Image: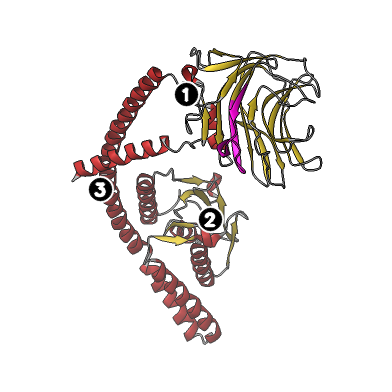
Amino acid sequence: MPKIKYTSFFFFIVFTVVCKSQNTPQPVAKFSFNEKNESDEVNKRKAKLIGVKNTSDRFGNDNYAVFLSGNEESYINLGNYKELKPKTGSISLWINIENRIRSGTGPEYNPIILTKSTALEDFYEAYAIYYFLDTRKLIAVSIEDSIKEVALFYMKPIVHDNWYHIVMAYDDNYSLLYVNGVLEDKHPKKFETRFLSGDSVLVGNTGSKKNQRYFNGTIDDIEFYDKVLSSEEVLRLYESPNPNQNKIILEQCLFIAFILLIIIIILILIRSYIKSTLKKEKQRLELANSLLENELRINRALMNPHFIFNSLNTLNHYILTNNNEIASDYLVKFSKLIRKILDSNMSDTISLEQEIELIHGYLEIEGMRFKEDIKYDLSIDPAIIPSTIIIPIMMVQPFVENSVWHGLRDKKGDKIIRIKFSQIDEKYIECIIDDNGTGRKKKEPNALEKKSLATKFVMQRLELLNKIHNKNCSLFIIDKENGMGTIVKIILPILNK
């Protein structure tokens, strides 16, 4: 079965690569001029190459481009058929300008490619790309009449004897100009492109008596599309590889070999990943089981029988002394606390909101049993929304209980405990428990043993959480000077995800 899965995966990868390679847009007309070819490679229609010379393309392949001399006897007539005049379309070509040609009449620009929308001598370009002589910048125009026209500009001066890839795209709403794969200009159009019946698409010649201008440079790979190309498609055209067949075959072989190598590496990595995942899952389950066992022990230890016994004794005392109102209030608070503890024990996690409610309830009950009330301050970082933070259960309460029973119980005067929750980052929160009790150093052995047991349980849980969830939790207990209390700092993980 694994071999069948790997084989299926292999063919899926190959199929995806092949489909992606075929995802390049297909032109409706194409003149590559490769090996002196004068024909449209899609429609098999021959263009008229007048006074041009075959020359090298941008890759250095001989006879793969054509050179125009810059006079009225040197131009290309691509023809007059619908594929060259799409209502919605894109024209792509490569140019290398040799010189600025000032001979001729009319506005001082050299024509690169154009076809007409009207027989008039002005405002006649259905689409056209020109090179301005003075500014040395490119302009692409589309004109319906003297009122409705669009002009797109490439504002950087053209450097002579350098190759440029130009794409002019248009529909009824917009015209766009790309140079070297980058969108340089875009304007609303708001009119339908019209073409003059019988007029050809010319390269390097305006075909006008009033405006006679010419082009001097190299032209290559003229392609027509019956759609507005996307930026990704234009970029793929700009990054088209060398058309030399031998090089293409070699590159394809290298590409296939590379893909096969990548597939083999991927298969090896997948196999290693599956083995590693299964191993980690086994370890995680073992750790989770160990965590569960420790949680059960902690719950038994923390559900302190003395707390329940003493609470009931306090309640009995209120009843015997006829403090019925206080007894009732005490009983309500006690029952709510027990209910919350029992409910929370059904899960190994708890919301920070519920944890705070448990701490409030516990401190209220313990405060009622002392001769002097326990003063406590519980603050929360404003950045924290307690109901949205999930933390491990029973990580804070043991230290609050320690502060009350082993720090504040025997203290004379004010009994103060401060609890603060702060968010460290999106993965951790910090809880600080600060009391002004008698500290840890002068306690009887049994009390110290009991406190260290709860601390040990919590530290074990933190270690397990670090391993299972790849966290960095920690616990610090600091004794204040002169036995003036204890500070506990716990770095807890946020287990929302």
Q: Is residue 217 magenta?
A: no
Q: Secondary structure at mark 3?
A: helix
Looking at the rendering, the stretch of residues picked out in magenta corresponds to: 76-93
Determine contact: label 3, label 1, CB under 8 Å. no
Q: Which residue is mark 2?
A: 437
Estimate how packed mark 2 is, as few (under 14), some (14 to 19) or many (20 or more) residues with alpha carbons within 10 Å. Answer: many
Marks 3/1: CA–CA distance: 50 Å
**Residue 174 image offset from top left, x and y in percent:** 68, 43
Query: Taking 39 as reference, is 59 above or below it?
Result: above
- Image quadrant of residue 146? top right
Mark 1 residue element: loop
40 left or right of 15 in image: right
* Left or right side of 23 for 101: right
Mark toward the start of the polypeptide (2 vs 3): 3
State how far apart marks 2 and 3 are (Cα).
45 Å
Cα distance, mark 1 to mark 2?
Answer: 79 Å
- Which residue bears the numbered disc 1? 241
Query: Is residue 278 left or right of 195 when viewed as pictured?
Result: left
In reply to whether residue 85 is colored magenta, the answer given is: yes
Return the residue at label 3. 282
Q: Tell me the kind of residue under disc 2.
A: Gly
Q: Nearer the viewer, residue 310 or 419?
A: 419
Secondary structure of the residue carrying tag 2 is loop
Q: Nearer the viewer, residue 178 or 130?
A: 130
Kindly check if marks 2 and 3 are in contact, taking CB atoms under 8 A apart as contact: no
Please give the name of the residue rendered at 57% of the width and 23% of the height, measured from the top-left corner: 48
